[in-house]
Amino acid sequence: MASPIAHTFGGFWTFLILAAQLKTRLAAQWRQWLPRLGVLMLVANLPDLDFLPVLFNGSAKNLHHSFTHSLIFAILVSLILSSAWRIAPGFWRSTLLYFTAYSSHLLIDFFTGTKIGWTHTGFGMPLFWPWSKEFSSPLILTFGVRHKTFAALFSLDNIWSCTYELLTCGAITAIILVLWKARLNSRNRFTLSEAPVAERRA
Ligand SMILES: [Zn+2]
């Protein structure tokens, strides 16, 4: 599994989709959007709740990457959450957004393994549960976190994999934000150059 760092970024990227859809000015109204951001980040981490037993009995090997890492569970959770709180205008738009946040987790885990590259070292998830077959990508883009025991969670390998996630996801986020700002600027320029024409017409 990837660490909560990569999955939290997944929730943040989903939030950017919502902000883009609503054409909101994030910088000016960020306080108002914080609850939505927090919820989407939580939803993106939700599938790893099956990891909780490690905290109690020291080993979650058999439980982790269980049915919570399946599409049917993603749909179910999205429908329930959307019934509880419309995070976007409309039930189905909310469901889709929750689903995007939840499945960002599945997507990241799909490309997670022990060795970067075309290595077939993915951990596997029962994507089409209750069918027990496990799926993972032959191409591995991010390291997994070692979690066989509670102590292993704090190993040097895990510190390195968390740093790797922080750097790669941070770089992807920076690129998205730069592109976003460039798009906003060009839209503003377009609006400004349109204004005198509109005034002249009036
Ligand atoms: Zn996971």
Image (tube, helix red, strand yellow):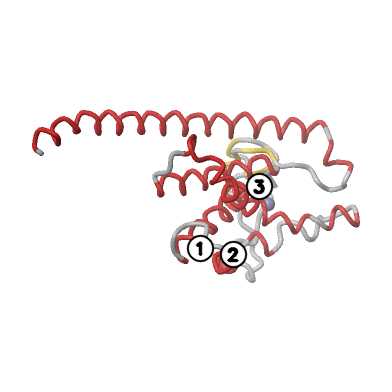
Q: Quadrant of residue 20?
A: top left
Determine crowd level at label 3: few under 14, some 14-19, many 20+ residues with C-alpha closer than 10 A.
many
User: Mark on residue 122?
Assistant: 3
Residue labelled with disc 2: 81
The numbered mark, 3 or 1, whose residue comes first in the sequence reads 1
Residue at 86% x, 53% y is 55
Instruction: Count the marks.
Output: 3
Q: Is residue 107 above or below residue 173?
A: below
Cα–Cα span, label 3 and label 1: 29 Å
Secondary element type, mark 2: helix
Q: Is 151 placed left or right of 131 in the picture? A: right
The response on whether ligand 1 sits within 8 Å of label 1 is: no
Cα–Cα span, label 3 and label 2: 30 Å
Quadrant in the picture for the C terminus: top left
Residue 146 rendering spot, x and y as whole percentages: 78, 42
Residue labelled with disc 1: 95
Q: Is 65 placed left or right of 18 in the picture? A: right
Secondary element type, mark 1: helix
In the rendered structure, which amino acid carries the disc numbered 2? Leu
Determine crowd level at label 2: few under 14, some 14-19, many 20+ residues with C-alpha closer than 10 A.
some
Cα–Cα span, label 1 and label 2: 7 Å
In the rendered structure, which amino acid carries the disc numbered 3? Gly
